[in-house]
Image (cartoon, helix red, strand yellow):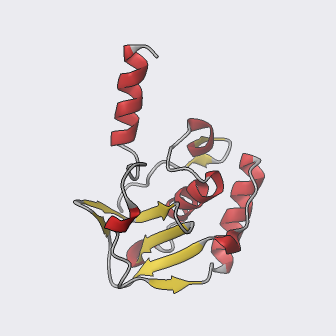
Amino acid sequence: MNSLTRVFLAAALLVACHHPLAPWEEIDLSKAVRVEPSLQYIVWWNELEACSGLSGNVNAVAFYVIPNDSTIQVGSESYWGYWIKDGNKIVLASAWTNNEKLVKHEEMHALLQSALHPPAYFNGTCGDLTYPNEG
C-alpha cells in the first residue's frame, strides 16, 4: 500500500460516522429504549437491499432510541446514530429517528456488517448515504 493510500484511509476513518475500532461499551445504553423497527424503517431497509444487492433481516437488528436527546455520546465523541456490531444494534438519538438519510446510513452498516464506509454502498447506487448535515 503506498503512502497516499494510507493517508486516504486514515482520513476516511477520521471522518467516518464512527470509528470502526471504538469499543461499543463506551455507549451508555442505560437510558436507551429498545423499539421495533417501524414500517418506515422496514421500507427503507427494503430499498437498501434492492439498490445494493445485499440482503439481511431487518428484524435481526436491535433498534434503540435515546429519548430526549439530540446526540449519542461515544467516549468523547457525539453522534446522531451509531451501529454496534456486537448484537447488531442501531442506536439513534431521538431527534434523528425520522431522518431517512441517517437511518439508512446506519441500516447500511447493519446490512454490510461493517463499520467501514465503502463508497459503492455509501455514495453509489443507493444514493448519498454519507453522514447527514445537521438541519
Foreground residue among 130 and 111: 111
Q: Is residue 11 above or below residue 90?
A: above
Residue farthest to the left, as pictured: 76
Left or right of 52 in this view: 19: left
Q: Residue at x 43, y 13 (%)?
A: 2
**Residue 57 x/y as whole percent:** 73, 67
**Residue 17 x/y as whole percent:** 40, 52
Left or right of 57 in this view: 78: left
Q: Quadrant of residue 67?
A: bottom left
Left or right of 98 in this view: 38: right
Q: Quadrant of residue 12?
A: top left
Q: Quadrant of residue 110?
A: bottom right
Q: Residue at x 68, y 64 (%)?
A: 45
Question: What is the quadrant of the C terminus in the image?
Answer: bottom left
Foreground residue among 13 and 51: 13
**Residue 131 x/y as whole percent:** 44, 52
Q: Residue at x 65, y 74 (%)?
A: 40
**Residue 44 x/y as whole percent:** 66, 65
